[in-house]
Image: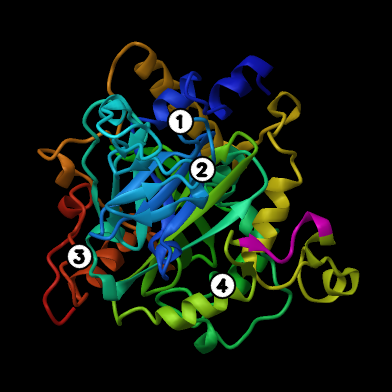
Amino acid sequence: MMSQEQNDLITRTGASEPCGKLMRMYWQPAALVDELEGDRPVRPVRLLGENLVLFRDERGRYGLIDRHCAHRGADLAFGRLEHGGLRCAFHGWLFDASGQCLETPAEPRGSQLCANIRQRAYPVVERSGILWAYLGEGQPPAFPEIDGFIAPDSHTFAFKGRMACNWLQALEVGIDPAHASYLHRFFEDEDTSAAYGRQFRGASAGSELPMTKILREHDRPIINVEHTEYGLRLIALREIDAARTHVRVTNQLFPHGFVIPMSTEMTITQWHVPVDDENCYWYAIFTSYAAPVDKKKMRDQRLELYTLPDYVSRKNKANDYGFDSQEQRTSTYTGMGSDINVHDQWAVESMGAIQDRTREHLGQSDKAIVQYRRLLRQEIEKVSRGETPILVLDEGNARSIQGPATMDGIGPTQGWETFWMEVDVKRRRGAPWAAPVPNDIAPHVRHLTAAE
């Protein structure tokens, strides 16, 4: 358990809050590139508690500026895209992507009022299907060379979904290896050949065993947590028998992301981004090491659950997440259908808008949660002292963070420590794009031939 003061420290992300100052030192997902498609590329955005408007001008430049006009506060999300910027529909004041006021047409001819008017603005860059914004001060950091950022567009797919809860509890479900054996338990296994695009429904690498069977029958994993340059590495071990152990390697990517295996060919890199302190979006980049991603299939699968334009789940608190008591008795552990995003959403939203951690009781299976909270507090304190937190990189050291390595497979009970690294490296060296071998595992893996 923790005090209310400690809980507030690690959950609240307003501009004046210690955790909010930490978050503003990193690029934040602001929207999917897809959201600015169409004949009017303008979207309201609420990010880290700030009300903003995102737009793309006629020259293709992205702007992210205060949503309320600097003149008299009208809503720029209803503005007109013209003449090199976004024009307020109230009096016609025009702002460019940098926030500079270009015109104040209602003023007398020759007025220079606009020269001294600037709307607060933040830089925006496009990366792997997501538009990223930097809400901090000074020079933005470099992007680490993780797989989701350096893979070609053909081998990545981006999507998002909204959750009605604080960002931290949404993140913590993703770094909890034990919950999958319960929350995502299916009482019957499916044909693993039909698992494309669906997490925990395929076969584990190196075997024909469905992940559903492994999670269901081996529900007491041994969990190892390692500190890394980018955050944490989590290794969950489920012993199948004396000779075989299921190994699942995932990663916490600081400050609010994780990298997990989706299948033998694909990983998910996912961030949990505060809309404000009581709502968040998850943004995910799906990265393939084999064939190009079937983006239409991936998108269509997810639009069965999420509604546009706000990417809100059709199954939610208002309809009890589709809960069916007969299904809970016979088919799934939750009774909430087969989409694990619904299971996760129920779990984290049911805790309340901001989880009251003064009442929780953690166990051994929560060791990754404990380690992450310590890391988060440590990095918040660094920022308060004027120091640089982890993963705030410059161009000179951006390449130091690669991968990170993931794996989900059946390996030897004796020797799993290097087995998982070899599986990850083999996949990388067989990829049709230049997937780098992460520096932290390269020295531990024997040389693999091209045939291997």
Q: Are marks 2 and 3 in contact (CB under 8 Å)?
A: no
List the residue tagged with mark 3.
435
List the residue tagged with mark 2.
90
Q: Residues within 10 Å of mark 4 (few under 14, many from 20)?
A: many
Residue segment shown in magenta: 312-318
Mark before the other along the chain sequence, 1 or 4 = 1
Q: Are marks 2 and 1 in contact (CB under 8 Å)?
A: yes
Comparing 259 with 236, the one in front is: 259
List the residue tagged with mark 1.
71
Q: Residues within 10 Å of mark 2 (few under 14, many from 20)?
A: some
Q: Nearer the viewer, mark 2 or mark 3?
A: 2
Tell me the amino acid under the disc marked 3: Ala
Residue 221's tag is none
Cα distance, mark 2 to mark 3? 50 Å
Q: Are marks 1 and 4 in contact (CB under 8 Å)?
A: no
x and y, in percent, of residue 422 in the image: 26, 64
